[in-house]
Amino acid sequence: MTQERANKTGFETRAIHAGYEPDAMTGAVIPPIYASSTYKQDGVGGLRGGYEYSRSANPTRTALEGALAAVEDGVRGFAFASGLAAEDTIIRALTGTGGHVVIPDDAYGGTYRLFDKVAKVWGLDHSPAPVADTEAVAAAIEPGRTRLVWVETPTNPMLTIGDIEALATVAHDAGALLVVDNTFASPYLQQPLTLGADVVVHSTTKYVGGHSDVVGGAVIVRDLELAEKIAFHQNAMGAVAGPFDSFLVNRGLKTLHVRMDRHCDNAERVVAFLDADPRVTEVIYPGLTSHPGHEVAARQMKRFGGMVSFRVAGGVERALAVCERAEVFTLAESLGGIESLIEHPGRMTHASVAGTDLEVPDDLIRLSVGIESVEDLLADLDRALG
């Protein structure tokens, strides 16, 4: 399906068809894995379809990048070797020495580490701010220096919600760009570019890939000027998605809508169970009307996602015990796969922010609710809490 035609279709159709036309020679309906590092030229500079070397472009990656742009309603997508490689490319392409970035005060630990331990050494400063407080984000901006306002919504792992439209206005008024990490929501549940964001970033390892069998990242942009900057740095830095990884992520994207609906169904049942359990002191989920960001999430998300965080009576030791007793929920990092995962953020994914302003509560447990039988998930949580 051509990009122009794909842009006029529904999400599900775009996820399946955008970015690729059936192979002209064989009629293959799924993009082949082009396991080639280089391409024959028809005379010096006579490139076939623009392909010369697979760091610069590979047909399997091209198909994925076209599909990513279509589902996020962007002008161009870029596939990377990991989510952090995608973030690194954004930082280098769109900031500079002496610049400044506003980041979430409960950002993913790896993102914080990238800004605090890597980018800071290059001379890029950062300030944390609560993404749910638009005025606080505005106050953290340094006019003339702030290049990016970096937002996760929902955030990892506290599931805080930022108002994308309002944050875009604040960023643009200060001459900055709004970058939204859309990993937790996925393109199916939320499309930040349509709400005013300039750049969307994903760890495609998570919901887009969806099967815990590939590591990848993506960047999607809303205008061609940004696309040119990202494209140059993607090629110059070289942290691109390989053809096998691109194939797996693209395959996952084609069923994203079906999986996300089941993730949401199961998460809603898990939340209802936890919310009624006296052994649980707090349930954090944007779908709860008690969640401070519920109304904003309801406005900008199709549904509320498959990620659930909760706190337990008994402190850190009880939280660790719950994580270790779970069986159907696998004790592991990452998220967004078909299987349910449980983790202790303070000791696992967010250990890098311990002792900082971004430290998470030590009695917090994070669930990535999978697509198993929900009755089995509820029984497993009941045993683990016991």
Image (cartoon, rainbow, N blue to C red):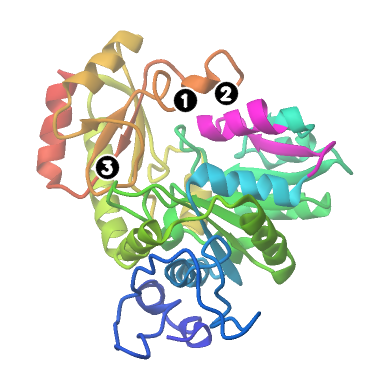
Q: What residue type is labelled 3?
A: Val
Q: Can residue 275 be seen in this view?
A: no
Which quadrant does the N terminus fall into? Answer: bottom left
Estimate how packed mark 1 is, as few (under 14), some (14 to 19) or many (20 or more) residues with alpha carbons within 10 Å.
many
Residue 358, numbered label? 2
In-front residue for pair 276/211: 211
Q: Which of marks 2 and 1 precedes in the sequence?
A: 1
Q: Which residue is drawn at the image coordinates 65% and 80% (left, top)?
A: 44
**Is residue 100 inside the magenta stretch?**
yes
Residue 350, numbered label? 1
Question: Would residue 375 appear left or right of 114 to someone viewing this image?
Answer: left
Q: Which residue is drawn at the image coordinates 48% and 88% (left, top)?
A: 5
Q: Position of residue 204 (x, y in %)?
A: 42, 52
Cβ–Cβ below 8 Å for labels 1 and 2?
yes
**Up-down: is 170 above or below 137?**
below
The residue carrying mark 3 is 369
Q: Which residue is drawn at the image coordinates 72% and 29% (left, top)?
A: 120
Cβ–Cβ below 8 Å for labels 2 and 3?
no
Q: Which residue is drawn at the image coordinates 41% and 43% (left, top)?
A: 289
How far apart marks 1 and 2 lie (CA) works out to 9 Å
- Specify start and end residues of the magenta stretch as a single range: 96-119
In-front residue for pair 59/269: 59
